[in-house]
Amino acid sequence: MSFFGFKGGVHPKENKTQTKDEKTVVMKTPSMVYIPLVQQNPGIPVKPIVKVGDKVLKGQKIGDSDAFMTTPVHSSVSGTVKKIEDRAYPIMGAIVSTICIENDGEDTWAELTKLDDWEKASKEELLAIIREKGIVGIGGATFPTHVKLNPPKDAKIDTLLLNGAECEPYLNSDNRLMLDDPQSIIEGIKIIKKILGITNAIVGIEENKPRAIENMQKAAAGTGIEIAPLKVKYPQGGEKQLIKSVLNRVVPSGKLPSAVGAVVQNTGTAAAIYQAVVNGIPLIERVVTVSGKAVKKPKNVRVAVGTLFSEILNFCEVDRENIYKLILGGPMMGMAQYSEETPVIKGTSGLLALTKEETNAYETRNCISCGKCIGVCPMGLLPLNFVQMVIKGKFQELGPANILDCMECGSCAFVCPANRPLVESIKLGKLKLRELMVKK
Ligand code: SF4
Ligand code: SF4
C-alpha cells in the first residue's frame, strides 16, 4: 500500500519500551467507583436515573439524556449508590456531578441483550445499540460513536479508516489490544462497515509496532480489511493526518473527514462496538497504560471506568515523592492532573507519573521568531500569530486565522526553543473566540 505522509509533525522520544511487552493485566474493581455524569467533556451532562440508596448491577444504565450528542453512562460494578455529588473530573480541572457507587464485590451483571445475528439488523438498530451501550471514541476525544457513524446524507463515504497509530509517546493501550484481542477489533470493523454500507476498511498502524501489524494481518486474513503500516511521526494518529497519509486526501479547513469520503474510528472503539452489539456489554472498562519513571511497575491495566487514579497508582507501585507531573493521556496532548482522587473515564488511554527529568521543566523565555513552530504544524497554521493575538486580546482575528483547525497536538510547543506555552494560549484563544461566536 502506498504511503503518502503529511506535512509537518515531530519525532518525540517514543518511551514505549517500558510497557510494550507488558500483557494487559486486569485490576480488581475498587471498593468505590465514581462515574461522572458527562460522556464527552464538561458541558454536556446527562441526568442520573438512579438515586442514593438504590442497588445497581454491573452494566446497568445509571445516567442518560435526550439531548443530541449525549450517550448514557453505566455502572462498572454491582453495589449501592452512596452519593451523587460534585467531584473533580480529569479534563480542564472541571468539577462535575458524579455517581458514587459502593462495590458489593459480587460482580452481578445486569441482563445483557446479545445480538449474535447482527448481520440481519438494520443500520438504525445497530446505531441505537451503540448509543444505548454508551460507546464513544476511546482514543481520547470521547465523541459519541453513534453520531460519528451517521454522517450527513449527502456525504459519499467510501472508506473506513481505523486508527491504530497510537503515536503519543509512552502509550501502549491500543498496541496491547491489537496484540491481546485483535479479533474483537476485526469483528467491530465488520459491524461498522455494515452500518456505513461500505466495503473498504484500512487499519493504520505505526511501524514501531511490528507485532501488532503482524497480529492484525493474521486476524484480518480473508476479510478484505487492509492493514497499512505507517511511518513513525507524531501526530500520525490525528484524523486529518491519517486520512492524508493513507488516502492522500486533504480535509478542507473547518470540514469533517466525511467531506472527503472517510470515517475514522479508533481500534479500541471498534472492539467496544463488537462487545456492545454482539455481547451486549456497555463501555464500562478500558485498557490504560501506566508509565513514567515514578512508576515502579509500569503496566497496561484493564480497569473499571470510575476507578480513582490513586488506586491505579497504588496497583502499579508508584513512588509519589518522585512524581513531578501526573498526566492523563500522553505527554503531547494529555492533561496535567492536580489530584489523584479523580476517576478513569471512557477516554483515559494513559496515566503517566513523570519525574522532573522526564518533563520539560525549563523556564519560558521571549519568542525569538525562529519560526520552528510554524514549520512543524501539521495543520499548516501559524501558532506564533495565535499567541500574539491572544496576548493583545484580538480574539475576533483568531477565526479568520483558522485557530479552530488547531488539533492541540502540541508539536509547536515541543520544538519551541523558548519553551513558550503555545498550546495553553491556543486553548484560551479558542475559548474566547467561541464565546464571541455564541454572543453574535
Ligand atoms: S498550532 Fe495546533 S495543530 Fe499546529 S502544531 Fe500547534 S498545537 Fe498542533
Ligand atoms: S518556535 Fe517558539 S520561539 Fe520560535 S517562533 Fe515559535 S513561539 Fe517563537
Image (cartoon, helix red, strand yellow):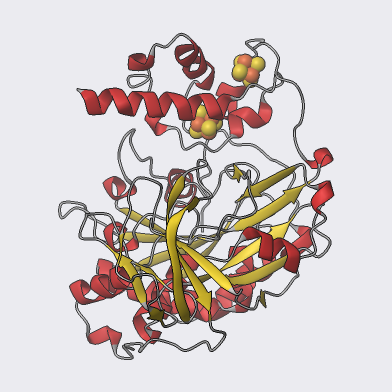
Q: Nearer the viewer, residue 411 or 85?
A: 85
Q: Nearer the viewer, residue 278 or 97?
A: 97
Residue sitting at x 74%, y 71%: 22
Q: Is residue 400 above or below residue 293?
A: above
Residue 201 makes an appearance in the image? yes
Residue sitting at x 21%, y 73%: 123
Q: Is residue 276 above or below residue 346?
A: below
- Where is residue 7? Give x, y as percent: 53, 34
Q: Residue furthest front?
A: 53
Q: Quadrant of the C terminus?
A: top left
Q: Nearer the viewer, residue 373 or 322?
A: 322
- Where is residue 89? Give x, y as percent: 50, 50
- Where is residue 177? Give x, y as percent: 59, 71
Residue sitting at x 27%, y 54%: 69
- Residue 186 lies left or right of residue 66; in this view the side is right
Task: Name the quadrant containing residue 158.
Answer: bottom left
Task: Name the quadrant containing residue 277.
Answer: bottom left
Residue 225 makes an appearance in the image? no
- Residue 269 lies left or right of residue 123; in this view the side is right
- Where is residue 11? Give x, y as percent: 68, 40
Residue sitting at x 79%, y 41%: 358
